[in-house]
């Protein structure tokens, strides 16, 4: 049975955020499963890892005979290596045979923080062919119709926010709304990491008051939010700091008429600074610290994917106020996201990606 329902976002209390039928179907799948695989997207970030590990802890804490496996397409950043349960995460690029085996054994596949099977790389085709039920939870625009049950809300700050609401509502439904769900500490640490990172430490996509009710609940569960911030944002290497200076001093182009900053980094430049996954995290936000810059775009070139000959350029967009960037991300770079924080991909060289952007951005960005 395919259920393509979306979240109802106007309910007045947190336990009712998700449509009742949709939440019930999602929990029916979760309760019935004993061998679960949890997938998230390539280049997993704090929201991807936080939501995946939180759900794994939730499932395994409820029943001793449940095995939930988190599978990521490629490595996650070092600054997320402290997350509880991360040592058991399987990385498809290095452990493809074991990942394939876990998918073959699964009676449920959960897809978190992505809405198209292409976002998880080579294992995406095998996922689509797997006959088991699939549950998707995501907050990006334009989901594809590949899951049995789809929870999709682009107005949410993060996938971790949606996972919180789903788990909370499942507890409330099972108790006729009498009890409020209390997350265990491991779940709370994972969820807060996703909330914090996907909002730039609550600087964008974070104006819904209910979001801070969630933060309060996670703090009651015992998280040390200042320590989590330190673990994520204050663990950079000297190479990363040198690369940041290079980006701002040598690579940042300004277009004052459009209040725009553009930074590009080629594969050769990344190698110069011994780039590791996650080293460019947050650089796209830095130009917005200038008083007259309202748009910031960052492009990072990657080696070709296996079986392809073209490089991949990851494009990140940020903006302030009533200046959406998600439309350009979707229409020009086959991506999407929130109005003020979006991303996309370009298949080709960094120079070609920059040329395309420079040709198209006046159609999407405001001059004043």
Image: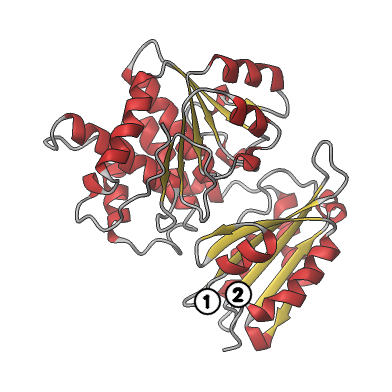
Q: Nearer the viewer, residue 319 or 226?
A: 319
**Circle 2 residues within 10 Å: few <14, some 14–19, many ≥20:** many
Q: Position of residue 230 (x, y in %)?
A: 50, 47
Q: Position of residue 14 (x, y in %)?
A: 24, 49
Residue pointed to by mark 1: 323
Q: Position of residue 73 (x, y in %)?
A: 66, 34
Q: Is 142 above or below relative to 253?
A: above
CA gap, disc 1 and disc 2: 8 Å
User: Does any portion of residue 221 appear in the rendered image?
Assistant: no
Label 1: which secondary element? loop
Farthest residue, direction top:
65
Q: Nearer the viewer, residue 25 or 335?
A: 25
Q: Residue at x 67, y 86 (%)?
A: 256
Q: Position of residue 167 (x, y in %)?
A: 31, 35
Residue pointed to by mark 2: 295
Q: Nearer the viewer, residue 367 or 141?
A: 141
Q: Residue at x 15, y 30 (%)?
A: 175
Which mark's residue is nearer the viewer, 1 or 2? 1
First of labels 1, 2 by sequence position: 2
Q: Is 222 above or below relative to 174?
A: below
């Amino acid at each position: 049975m395919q259920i393509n329902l979306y979240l109802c976002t106007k309910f007045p209390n947190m336990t009712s955020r998700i449509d009742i039928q949709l939440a019930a179907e999602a929990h029916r799948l979760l309760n019935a499963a004993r061998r679960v695989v949890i997938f998230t997207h390539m280049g997993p970030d704090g929201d991807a890892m936080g939501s995946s590990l939180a759900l794994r802890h939730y499932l395994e804490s409820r029943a001793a005979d449940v095995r939930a496996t988190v599978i990521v397409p490629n490595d996650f950043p070092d600054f997320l290596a402290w997350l509880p349960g991360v040592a058991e995460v399987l990385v498809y690029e290095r452990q493809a045979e074991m990942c394939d085996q876990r998918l073959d054994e699964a009676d449920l596949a959960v897809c978190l923080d992505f809405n198209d099977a292409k976002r998880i790389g080579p294992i995406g085709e095998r996922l689509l062919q797997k006959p088991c039920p699939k549950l998707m939870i995501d907050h990006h625009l334009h989901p594809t119709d590949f899951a049995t049950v789809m929870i999709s809300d682009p107005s949410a700050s993060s996938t971790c926010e949606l996972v919180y609401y789903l788990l909370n509502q499942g507890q409330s439904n099972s108790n006729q709304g009498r009890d409020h769900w209390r997350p265990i500490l491991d779940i709370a640490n994972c969820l807060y990491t996703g909330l914090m990172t996907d909002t730039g430490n609550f600087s964008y996509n974070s104006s819904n008051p209910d979001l801070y009710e969630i933060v309060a609940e996670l703090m009651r569960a015992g998280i040390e939010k200042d320590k989590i911030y330190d673990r994520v944002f204050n663990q950079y290497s000297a190479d990363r700091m040198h690369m940041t200076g290079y980006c701002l001093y040598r690579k940042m182009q300004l277009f004052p008429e459009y209040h725009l900053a553009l930074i590009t980094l080629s594969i050769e430049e990344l190698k110069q600074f011994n780039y590791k996954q996650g080293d460019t995290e947050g650089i796209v936000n830095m130009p917005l610290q200038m008083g007259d810059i309202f748009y910031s775009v960052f492009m990072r070139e990657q080696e070709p994917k296996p079986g392809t000959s073209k490089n991949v350029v990851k494009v990140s967009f940020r903006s302030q106020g009533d200046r959406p960037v998600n439309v350009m991300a979707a229409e020009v770079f086959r991506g999407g996201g929130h109005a003020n924080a979006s991303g996309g991909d370009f298949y080709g060289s960094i120079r070609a990606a920059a040329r395309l952007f420079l040709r198209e951005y006046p159609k999407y960005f405001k001059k004043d």
